[in-house]
Amino acid sequence: MMKYLSLLVALMLFSCGKEENIMLPKAAKTIVNDVQDHSPIYIFFRTKDKDTLAEVNRKNSIISTNWILNIDARLPLKLVIPEVMKLQDKKRKEKAHKNEKAENYYAYADTIGKNMAFISFTKVFYTVGKPNKDKLVFHFRKGNDFIFLNGVEVKKTDLITEFSKIKFEIMPDVVLLFDKNMSYGEYIQDKILIEDFKGTNQEYIF
């Protein structure tokens, strides 16, 4: 199991004599504590003039392995998710070296266990845009402890309880909607919060 050694939660990388830092997201829970046979992929936080950029380094990735994405927590979703979608698409379309058991994980730091941890997003399908009106939407907003559940505000920590109280004649399609300006770090915390909810693999970024 990989340990992190600093409360700054910085992933230190060295390539061509250059030190690189990634500030990993933090959470107080481990979903997966070890991933074997993996390839690391990095998405760095960059700035140019007044612009924020996401720079992808996947030169060490192997299609047939589990992929671990190490993404800087400071990056906004509007920059992260399009790059994740490209990576997913490449792996899903691969035929020659495809491994059906290989998964994709996001890496983060468990601040309680003081270890690296991982959450799978293998089956998630992302869409940049708004969901159709016939969907039941869990709407996560930037920096907000309340989300919209089908248009009604509920506390994040009460989301699954409140959802279970709704009586449906026919269960609707449930999707997750995340604010595109939300940081990747906040996104991972929200994902971990509802990790036990298995009702959807559809996520929208708008």
Image (cartoon, helix red, strand yellow):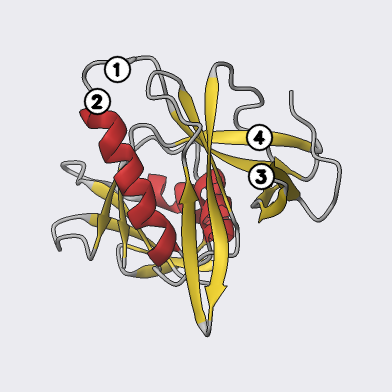
Percent coordinates x, y for residue 124 in the rendering: 33, 39
Element type at marker 3?
Answer: loop
Percent coordinates x, y for residue 65 in the rendering: 45, 20
In depth, the one of 98 and 1 nearer the eye is 98
Confirm or deny contact between disc 2 and disc 1 (CB under 8 A). Answer: yes
Q: Quadrant of the C terminus?
A: bottom left
Q: Amino acid at mark 3?
A: Cys
Q: Kindly identify which residue carries mark 2.
A: 94
Confirm or deny contact between disc 4 and disc 2 (CB under 8 A). Answer: no
Q: Quadrant of the N terminus?
A: top right
Query: Mark 2 vs mark 3: which is more N-terminal?
Result: 3
Give residue 172's mark.
none
Confirm or deny contact between disc 1 and disc 3 (CB under 8 A). Answer: no
Query: Mark 4 vs mark 2: which is more N-terminal?
Result: 2
Percent coordinates x, y for residue 88 in the rendering: 32, 38
Q: Kindly identify which residue carries mark 3.
A: 16
Q: Amino acid at mark 4?
A: Ala
Confirm or deny contact between disc 4 and disc 1 (CB under 8 A). Answer: no
Q: Nearer the viewer, mark 2 or mark 3?
A: 3
Above or below — where is 93 with respect to 6?
above
Q: Amino acid at mark 2?
A: Glu
